[in-house]
């Protein structure tokens, strides 16, 4: 600003000379840093600014000269001696460059739906896995968080199309195809480009059915070395815990349930202990990270080097994860810039000591009357004295003892878990780009990922034995051990080591041609890729009876009394060979048409007659604002229509071979013969090999991109309709068929259709105060169409106790809820006798509706209740900047789905705890409640447990302050962030984000484990030199 | 700028080299042994063993009890009053529906076993074994087992699909019986007699077993002459005899003994492998107990034993609360139920998951009773009476002398009940003889004539293959 005014004064007071001369000057950016590489044009010559932003150009004084630089607003200023020019960054996103698969494109030229998220959005809040920072930033891209430390969130783009393997999108890091980005330092990421529709992803063919996420890592820029340091420290705790019943509530409830079934057991009303198991388990835990990067470059070399250290404690004591990542990205130019070599390499070392997350579920279920530790220091167990009604394990003469439930002591389970995991992952690529002619470039790129992981688990069998029953003594254990010296049940301990190694690579070679004649612009790419993945090796060894000291923990030290377990396993790798091509044409940057074609051959399908697939796509676009009839409209800065069609595939399908079942132990393939009843081994066929091929998804997409009101309002709208034409389902064999194991077969079509809206408004209220608000909304409808008759009606969503909750049915969303309708509560026995009921219910239990009126309650009375898959999701991002302060608030929500609270259906007659809400609202006698059952409840799955899954999270509030040009530091920002501080939901369980394994026929959408949500408060510093 | 053709040619060549051939896509499986390769690793006998293995499945320890014993007048559900045992309570009370889990479990198990039998017959035929007799024997064993399982299906469900023909179409039961008979006739041709087997093969299907099963099959079809002939063949074969002490029949020391025609084998020592949890589900429940307490003898059965004065069989079949058992184990008076099934008791393994309890499927005493019944129906009361006498003499019961066909028939039926109690025969026998309605109603169970003679086709099956159709009134 000051420089600009100075420049004006210079112009005013110094006469322009009428002859051309060498005008010297300096180009700076808004922060006062020199801008190298800026193109300067005068009427007679052109020039480029150097390293320090200095330039020299031949021009007349006062002659207008133009400064252009990608990403900055083009400036035309009158030349003056020693002029100092400040360039402002372009406020439009449209000049940005988007990755399109084997190439890049300007956003204005894009004819398909690609969402881009830039690094400043990603690094705003520190996260272990960069995907977590994407939540709510792109319409149609759903990130389901996983709060366990070091865990990978699930990403679903435009609805669930694939039911079995391959549900995740494909990840490409700078061109290297990789399975997960867990070991990618989020600070190294320059941008995410998410290819949402088939038209853009089709060039990746059989990998791309569920979208493609392309990640570009940072590179050095021309200029002097930039050093960036980021540091943060955070504290986390449980968000929205469910309030559990306390001791007196539990006793009341338990006694009621016993009285209802005529059982004489009663707990005493005055209990000595009132344990809050969640408090006992989890406290506050901390995380910290440090990141330093050096980057810079000259004309022929650019470099980027970074080191990142991230340490996080889990909520459970002793759960730690630490990761160190080193990255080096360099580019070299040779032969006059015709040959460019890019080398990216990163190595990540991760160390973790996981603790069983199942302890949270145990903490939910364990009774509050049981102490964490008995007075003598042993772990509290759920034994109780039935005569006194107290949690004592000492049973006197004439007294009776019992066990309240079969749940262990969660604190004990955390303490006994001794697991250590170390992993190293190397990822890198080497790429050569050769400019053959000015319109033809040849590229070849080899990228690979290699990972090694080692897990050691030590199990203190003796310790667990003693903890399981407080009456047991060391002598008991030793006697048992002497009685069965070869039985591993009484070994002192066990030690196991598991090694996993995996390797994957892809080698791309392609030619890019780009030529323009008059107003015709052509761009073509053609190439070939070789890929190898799933090359996994796993070995597992386990021994028993090693010495207690950790330095002796190797299997040579294991006791010879026990047989060691040795397992080794090689996975069958998959080789993929692909050819691809793309042709883009535009006329005058007004009319666009683009087509791609990809042909993939996959070794998994070699046993079929057809193992080559072709995936075409075509898309068109029309930039209306470049038309003459719209170019004068005020406030309409950019308007583009686009539409596309593409076919993509999912080749990551389960490997189906006719399996012969054998077993070395007691199994139904083995039998006994002979007078000595010897064990004889046999075999059987498990399931037939159905010929599987890749799933093919076809999609049409139509969209509008616009910028209005001086580029302050920008947005886009997309409509899509995608269908997975041959979805693979996990098929339960027909009951009277010979097949006994589940197998995979193409069973149906899954359709996802919906629309996405993204709007962004940014403005400056004053010079110092600017703000932006971004909103995105996506709506999706999932339907299963055309199911093979034999597979229609398969049930799923097993709760593990014989109850099922979901069913596959044509016309419904995939594996939608299928449950009995809970229709009130039985108030009296007379009411039960007069109405249809299932089994022998009692007053206080749920009443179910007889849908078909046949007087019997069974499967035929179950009905469909929609799906766990959200119908809509939305995100809100607000950013404010006032002078040196910056504030951002991000929120994310989803809804329109139903989730099943499986925890509410805990078997209370098994003495397990309930939520306080369940206690307070229960039925206690005729007329007290017609919605909630009493303490004696049945174990049937029904709509009573189904709740709305709508939620809204504020997932980030950040306030920062930036100091500029302090000492040598060009930028110092301190900030405080609250991550996930608020979760608004009506759901009564722990979290409505219930993806579990992700498989729709399993427990996705059902809360069976009590994993809490986590909120984190972080204080951090960003430094730039 | 001149287009440098040389450079382009070089590049294309380089690209061509980089382009892989199809060989790149040939990857051998490293994980599961594919069917093509399994021929090198599994011999036909392994697949035959696998068929036998299906009889050790968990279904036989619980679901099977429900539909053969608990549902009948011999047994009650057992366990504690509040424990439904899945659908056992419903079966006991005849209030179960087509969604009953036990019915679906057995339907599925039987068909999987039939699948294994059919597969092993095909595999054996194609394997190129050189020993013709051995090959035929393996096929004979598979056919025996296939017939055995179809016999269950046709008795339980009536018209059922023949799996190898069409899963989705039910064939009339006469046709199923024809198929069963054909398999057994083929098996009889090629199976060796019990004494002809090598010692290590003790327990495999024998000629006698096939004949005995065929006799029973003919009995169910009321083909009295054939039933008589085949029962006679078994009795006169010289391979079998009656155990002198009835109480010993279900104990370990008489496993595969002289009376045993076919048993489901089990072992209790490590690596233990028996009918999974068979002894545990029926073991005494509560203090001093070793099991879950299901399938308890009914008062009705106890009364029948006492009315007959049949002390030996009563005490051998029933464990009484407070009793000290033959091996010294004391059953406390604090156990949950007054009576338990002694035939399921394993002295060495009690409530272990895999115990040494062999399940006696066919034994000589039943063949005597089949001959008696068939002879009586043919009007040959002298053979009927002598066969009956063999069985009754063994347990010190008086001789029956009546030659009246109707009276004798009922007496033989009563003898079957007392002799074969808890040997998984009672329910099918009640239905076969037409006594089911009266027996159930006498016990206050709502037996519906025209409905309960057959089990319903499982609802799970009808969801998958709706065209099968349901049994009447279900």
Image (cartoon, coloured by chain):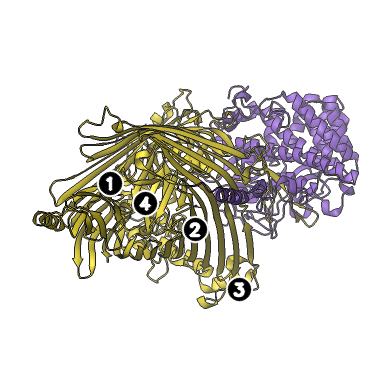
Chain colours: A yellow, B purple
The mark lying in front, picked from 3 and 1, is 1
Q: Which residue is label 1 attached to? A: A891
Q: Which residue is label 4 attached to? A: A191
Direction from residue B204 to residue A578 in the image, left or right: left
| Secondary structure state at the residue bearing disc 3 | loop
As drawn, which residue projects farthest toward the front?
A: A19
- Looking at the rendering, which quadrant does residue B389 occupy? top right
Marks 3 and 4: in contact by CB < 8 Å?
no
Above or below: residue A305 compared with residue B308: below
Above or below: residue A317 compared with residue A999: below
Direction from residue A6 to residue A735 in the image, left or right: right
Disc 4/disc 3 C-alpha distance (Å): 51 Å
Q: Earlier in the sequence, mark 4 or mark 1?
A: 4
Q: Which residue is label 2 attached to? A: A429
Marks 1 and 4: in contact by CB < 8 Å?
no
Disc 3/disc 1 C-alpha distance (Å): 54 Å
| Residue at image location 69% in from the left, 40% down from the top | B305
Dots 4 and 3 on the same chain: yes
| Residue at image location 63% in from the left, 60% down from the top | A568
Quarter of the C terminus of chain A within the rendering = bottom left
Using a 10 Å C-alpha cutoff, classify the residue at mark 2 as few (fewer than 14 neighbours), some (14 to 19) or many (20 or more).
many
- Chain assignment, label 4: A
Using a 10 Å C-alpha cutoff, classify the residue at mark 1 as few (fewer than 14 neighbours), some (14 to 19) or many (20 or more).
many
Q: Earlier in the sequence, mark 2 or mark 1?
A: 2
- Chain assignment, label 3: A
- Looking at the rendering, which quadrant does residue A15 occupy? bottom left
């Amino acid at each position: 600003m000051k420089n600009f005014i100075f420049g004006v004064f210079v112009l005013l007071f110094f006469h322009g000379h009428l002859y051309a001369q060498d005008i010297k000057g300096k180009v700076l950016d808004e922060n006062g840093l020199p801008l190298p590489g800026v193109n300067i044009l005068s009427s007679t010559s052109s020039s480029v600014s150097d390293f320090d932003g200095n330039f020299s150009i031949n021009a007349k004084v006062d002659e207008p000269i133009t400064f252009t630089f990608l990403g900055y607003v083009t400036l035309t200023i009158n030349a003056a001696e020693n002029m100092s020019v400040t360039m402002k960054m372009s406020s439009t996103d449209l000049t940005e460059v988007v990755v399109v698969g084997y190439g890049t494109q300007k956003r204005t030229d894009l004819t398909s739906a690609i969402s881009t998220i830039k690094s400043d959005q990603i690094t705003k809040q520190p996260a272990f896995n960069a995907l977590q920072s994407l939540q709510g930033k792109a319409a149609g891209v759903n990130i389901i968080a996983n709060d366990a430390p070091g865990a990978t969130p699930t990403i679903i783009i435009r609805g669930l199309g694939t039911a079995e393997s391959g549900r995740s999108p494909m990840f490409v890091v700078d061109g290297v195809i990789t399975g997960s980005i867990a070991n990618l330092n989020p600070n190294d990421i320059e941008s995410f480009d998410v290819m949402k529709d088939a038209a853009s992803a089709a060039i990746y063919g059989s990998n791309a059915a569920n979208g493609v996420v392309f990640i570009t890592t940072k590179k050095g820029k021309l200029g002097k070395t930039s050093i960036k340091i980021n540091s943060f420290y955070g504290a986390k705790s449980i968000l929205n815990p469910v309030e559990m019943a306390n001791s007196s509530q539990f006793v009341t409830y338990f006694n009621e349930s016993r009285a209802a079934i005529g059982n004489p057991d009663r707990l005493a009303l005055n209990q000595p202990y009132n344990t809050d198991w969640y408090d006992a388990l989890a406290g506050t835990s901390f995380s910290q990270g440090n990141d330093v990067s050096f980057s810079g470059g000259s004309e022929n070399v650019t470099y980027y080097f970074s080191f990142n250290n991230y340490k996080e404690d889990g909520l459970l004591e002793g759960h730690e994860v630490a990761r160190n990542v080193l990255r080096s990205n360099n580019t070299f130019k040779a032969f006059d810039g015709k040959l460019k070599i890019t080398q990216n390499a990163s190595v990540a070392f991760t160390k973790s000591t996981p603790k069983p997350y199942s302890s949270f579920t145990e903490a939910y279920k364990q009774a509050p009357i049981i102490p964490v530790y008995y007075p003598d220091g042993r772990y509290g167990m759920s034994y109780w004295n039935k005569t006194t009604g107290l949690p004592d394990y000492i049973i006197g003469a004439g007294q009776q003892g019992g066990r309240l439930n079969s749940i262990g002591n969660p604190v004990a389970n955390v303490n006994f878990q001794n697991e250590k995991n170390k992993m190293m992952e190397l990822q890198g690529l080497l790429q050569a780009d050769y400019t053959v002619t000015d319109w033809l470039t040849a590229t070849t790129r080899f990228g690979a990922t290699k990972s090694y992981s080692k897990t050691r688990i030590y199990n203190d069998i003796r310790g667990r034995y003693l903890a399981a029953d407080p009456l047991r003594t060391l002598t008991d254990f030793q006697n048992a051990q002497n009685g069965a010296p070869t039985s591993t049940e009484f070994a002192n301990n066990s030690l196991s080591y598991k090694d996993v190694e995996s390797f994957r690579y892809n080698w791309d070679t392609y030619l890019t041609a780009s030529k323009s004649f008059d107003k015709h612009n052509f761009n073509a790419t053609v190439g070939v890729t070789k890929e190898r993945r799933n090359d996994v090796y796993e070995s597992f060894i386990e021994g028993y009876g090693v010495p207690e000291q950790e330095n002796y923990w190797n299997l040579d030290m294991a006791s010879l009394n026990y047989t060691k377990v040795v397992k080794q396993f090689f996975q069958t790798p998959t080789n993929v060979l692909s050819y691809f091509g793309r042709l883009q044409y535009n006329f005058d940057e007004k009319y666009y048409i683009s087509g791609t074609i990809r042909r993939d051959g996959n070794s998994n399908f070699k046993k079929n007659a057809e193992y080559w697939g072709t995936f075409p796509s075509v898309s068109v676009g029309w930039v209306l604002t470049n038309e003459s009839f719209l170019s004068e409209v005020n406030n309409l800065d950019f308007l583009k229509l686009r539409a596309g069609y593409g076919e993509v595939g999912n080749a990551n399908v389960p490997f189906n071979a006719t399996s012969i079942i054998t077993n070395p132990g007691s199994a139904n393939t083995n039998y006994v013969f002979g007078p000595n009843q010897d064990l004889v081994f046999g075999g059987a066929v498990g399931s037939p090999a159905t010929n599987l091929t890749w799933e093919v998804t076809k999609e049409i997409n139509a969209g509008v991109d616009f910028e209005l009101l001086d580029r302050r309002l920008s947005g886009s709208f997309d409509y899509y309709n995608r269908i997975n034409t041959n979805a693979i389902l996990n098929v339960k064999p027909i009951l009277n068929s010979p097949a006994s194991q589940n197998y995979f077969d193409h069973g149906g079509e899954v359709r996802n259709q919906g629309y996405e809206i993204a709007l962004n408004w940014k403005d400056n209220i004053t010079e110092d105060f600017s703000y932006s608000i971004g909103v995105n909304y996506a709506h999706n409808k999932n339907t299963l169409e055309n199911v093979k008759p034999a597979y229609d009606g398969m049930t799923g969503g097993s709760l593990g106790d014989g109850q099922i909750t979901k069913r596959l049915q044509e016309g419904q969303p995939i594996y939608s809820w299928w449950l009995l309708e809970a229709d009130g509560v039985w108030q009296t026995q007379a009411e039960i006798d007069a109405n249809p009921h299932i089994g022998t219910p009692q007053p206080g239990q749920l009443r179910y509706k007889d849908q078909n009126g046949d007087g019997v309650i069974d499967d035929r009375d179950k009905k469909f209740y929609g799906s766990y898959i959200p119908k809509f999701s939305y995100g809100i991002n607000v950013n404010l900047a006032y002078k040196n302060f910056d504030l951002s608030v991000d929120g994310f929500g989803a809804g329109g789905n139903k989730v099943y609270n499986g925890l509410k259906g805990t078997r209370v007659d098994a003495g397990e705890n309930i939520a306080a809400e369940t206690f307070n609202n229960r039925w206690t006698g005729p007329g007290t409640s017609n919605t909630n059952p009493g303490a004696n409840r049945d174990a049937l799955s029904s709509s009573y447990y189904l709740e709305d899954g709508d939620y809204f999270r504020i997932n980030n509030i950040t306030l920062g302050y930036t100091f500029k040009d302090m000492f040598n530091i060009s930028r110092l920002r301190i900030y405080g962030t609250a991550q996930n501080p608020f979760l608004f939901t009506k759901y009564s369980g722990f979290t409505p984000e219930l993806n579990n394994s992700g498989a729709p026929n399993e427990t996705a959408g059902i809360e069976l484990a009590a994993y809490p949500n986590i909120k984190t408060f972080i204080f951090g510093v960003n430094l730039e030199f | 700028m001149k287009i440098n053709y040389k450079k382009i040619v070089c590049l294309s060549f380089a690209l061509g080299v980089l382009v892989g051939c199809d060989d790149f896509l040939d990857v051998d499986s490293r994980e599961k042994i594919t069917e093509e390769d399994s021929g090198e690793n599994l011999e036909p006998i392994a697949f035959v063993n696998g068929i036998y293995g299906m009889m050790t499945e968990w279904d036989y320890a619980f679901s099977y009890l429900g539909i053969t014993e608990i549902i009948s007048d011999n047994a009650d559900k057992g366990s504690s009053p509040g424990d439904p045992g899945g659908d056992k309570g419903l079966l006991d009370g005849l209030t179960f529906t087509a969604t009953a889990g036990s019915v679906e479990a057995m339907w599925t198990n039987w068909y999987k076993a039939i699948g294994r039998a059919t597969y092993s017959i095909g595999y054996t035929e194609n394997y190129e074994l050189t020993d013709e007799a051995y090959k035929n024997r393996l096929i004979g064993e598979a056919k025996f087992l296939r017939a055995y399982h179809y016999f269950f299906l046709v008795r339980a469900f009536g018209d059922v699909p023949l799996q190898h023909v069409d899963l989705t179409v039910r064939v009339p039961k006469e046709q199923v019986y024809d198929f069963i008979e054909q398999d057994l006739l083929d098996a009889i041709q090629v199976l060796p007699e019990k004494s002809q087997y090598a010692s290590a093969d003790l327990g495999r299907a024998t000629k006698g077993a096939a004949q005995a099963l065929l006799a029973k099959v003919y009995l169910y079809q009321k083909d009295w002459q054939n039933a008589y002939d085949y029962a006679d063949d078994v009795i006169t074969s010289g391979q079998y005899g009656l155990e002198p002490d009835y109480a010993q029949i279900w104990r370990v020391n008489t496993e595969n003994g002289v009376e045993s025609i076919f048993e489901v084998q089990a072992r209790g020592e490590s690596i233990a492998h028996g009918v999974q949890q068979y002894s545990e589900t029926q073991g005494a429940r509560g203090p001093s107990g070793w099991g879950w307490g299901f399938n308890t003898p009914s008062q009705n059965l106890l009364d029948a034993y006492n009315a007959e004065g049949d002390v030996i069989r009563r005490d051998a079949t029933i464990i009484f609360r407070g009793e000290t058992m033959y091996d010294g184990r004391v059953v406390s008076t604090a156990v949950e139920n007054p009576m338990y099934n002694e035939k399921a008791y394993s002295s060495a393994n009690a409530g272990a998951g895999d115990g040494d309890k062999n399940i006696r499927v066919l034994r000589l005493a039943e063949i005597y009773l089949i001959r008696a019944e068939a002879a009586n129906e043919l009007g040959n009361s002298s053979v009927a009476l002598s066969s009956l006498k063999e069985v009754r003499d063994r347990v010190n019961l008086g001789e029956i002398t009546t030659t009246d066909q109707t009276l004798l028939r009922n007496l033989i039926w009563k003898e079957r009940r007392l002799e074969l109690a808890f040997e998984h025969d009672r329910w099918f026998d009640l239905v076969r003889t037409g006594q089911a309605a009266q027996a159930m109603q006498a016990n206050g169970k709502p037996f519906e004539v025209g409905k309960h003679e057959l089990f319903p086709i499982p609802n799970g099956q009808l969801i998958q293959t709706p065209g099968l159709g349901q049994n009447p009134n279900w």
